[in-house]
Image (spheres, helix red, strand yellow):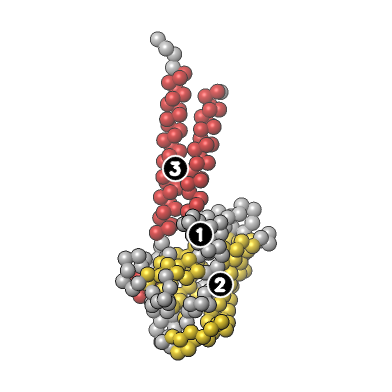
């Protein structure tokens, strides 16, 4: 019985370690893919995981930048969810190749659906043209749970490089043709025809693979730890000659 108790303790500790390795990859509201080319069009997905085990996510509210407004924004319907796109006056008109822009999309809200515990949902948006005078766009997001809790994903990046508690989803903008432009394929396919952005499914992003890799790596670590401990305990129980 002592052997069984010690083995159970080891398994529990290893499982906790695995969870600690896997959860950070799934924890925050993010924008996928994380980068796109300046001056182009792109399609992205706001990935929203449910972080509560006793409530469901029932509303997602994404604020769009007004200092670098986007002239074209369209959304892909999500089964079971209602979507409302809000346009508003800009603090200052912006000159674009389509003329002066004094109104733009300021907010997109998805509601009426449900993201249950242990699940996530992606909300897809086509948008452009992306600005050329900045290297990031942030999209502060509010996540509302069925119990009334609202999590505000709006913290700016920290100067020391560490992650904020509730980081705002951020899209990195790179020069056209840059090696970091992971969204370049999406940018080309999302360019508007007759001034209307096209919308098509978002390609699978690398972050999903990263999360899977972390989970498998953690599982391998569990198996290794259990094998070492069981072997050690077995040697201790072997009678000496």
User: Which numbered circle lies on residue 30?
Assistant: none
* Residue 28 visible to an observer of this rendering: no
Residue 41 in picture, x, y percent from top left = 40, 76
* Local SS, label 1: loop
Residue 221 in picture, x, y percent from top left = 43, 39
Task: Specify the quadrant that holds the N terminus.
Answer: top right
**Depicted 237 relative to depicted 209: above or below:** above
Q: Residues within 10 Å of mark 2 (few under 14, many from 20)?
A: some
**In the foreground, 132 or 143:** 132
**Depicted 95 relative to depicted 43: above or below:** below
**In the foreground, 195 or 4:** 195
Q: Quadrant of residue 195?
A: bottom left
Which residue corresponds to mark 2?
63
Which residue corresponds to mark 3?
219
Q: Which residue is located at x 53 percent, y 74 percent? A: 64
* Local SS, label 2: strand
Which residue corresponds to mark 1?
158
Calculate the distance from the C-alpha at mark 3 to the C-alpha at mark 2: 38 Å
Q: Nearer the viewer, mark 2 or mark 1?
A: 1
């Amino acid at each position: 019985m002592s052997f069984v108790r010690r083995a159970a303790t080891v398994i529990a500790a290893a499982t906790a370690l695995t969870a600690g390795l896997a959860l950070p990859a799934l924890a925050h509201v993010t924008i996928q893919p994380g980068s796109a080319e300046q001056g182009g069009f792109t399609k992205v997905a706001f990935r929203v995981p449910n972080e509560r085990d006793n409530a469901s996510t029932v509303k997602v509210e994404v604020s769009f930048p007004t200092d670098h407004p986007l002239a074209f924004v369209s959304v892909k319907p999500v089964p079971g969810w209602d979507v409302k796109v809000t346009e508003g006056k800009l603090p200052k008109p912006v000159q674009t190749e389509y003329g002066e822009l004094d109104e733009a999309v300021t907010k997109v809200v998805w509601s009426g659906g449900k993201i249950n515990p242990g699940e996530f949902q992606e909300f897809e948006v086509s948008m452009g043209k992306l600005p050329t005078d900045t290297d990031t766009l942030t999209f502060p997001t509010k996540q509302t749970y069925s119990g009334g809790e609202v999590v505000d994903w709006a913290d700016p990046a920290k100067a020391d490089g560490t992650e904020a508690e509730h980081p705002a989803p951020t899209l990195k903008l790179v020069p056209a043709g840059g090696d970091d432009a992971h969204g370049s394929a999406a940018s080309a396919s999302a360019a508007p025809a007759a001034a209307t952005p096209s919308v098509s499914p978002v390609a699978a992003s690398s972050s999903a693979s990263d999360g899977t890799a972390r989970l498998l790596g953690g599982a391998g670590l569990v198996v290794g730890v259990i094998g070492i401990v069981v072997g050690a305990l077995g040697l201790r129980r072997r009678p000496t000659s």
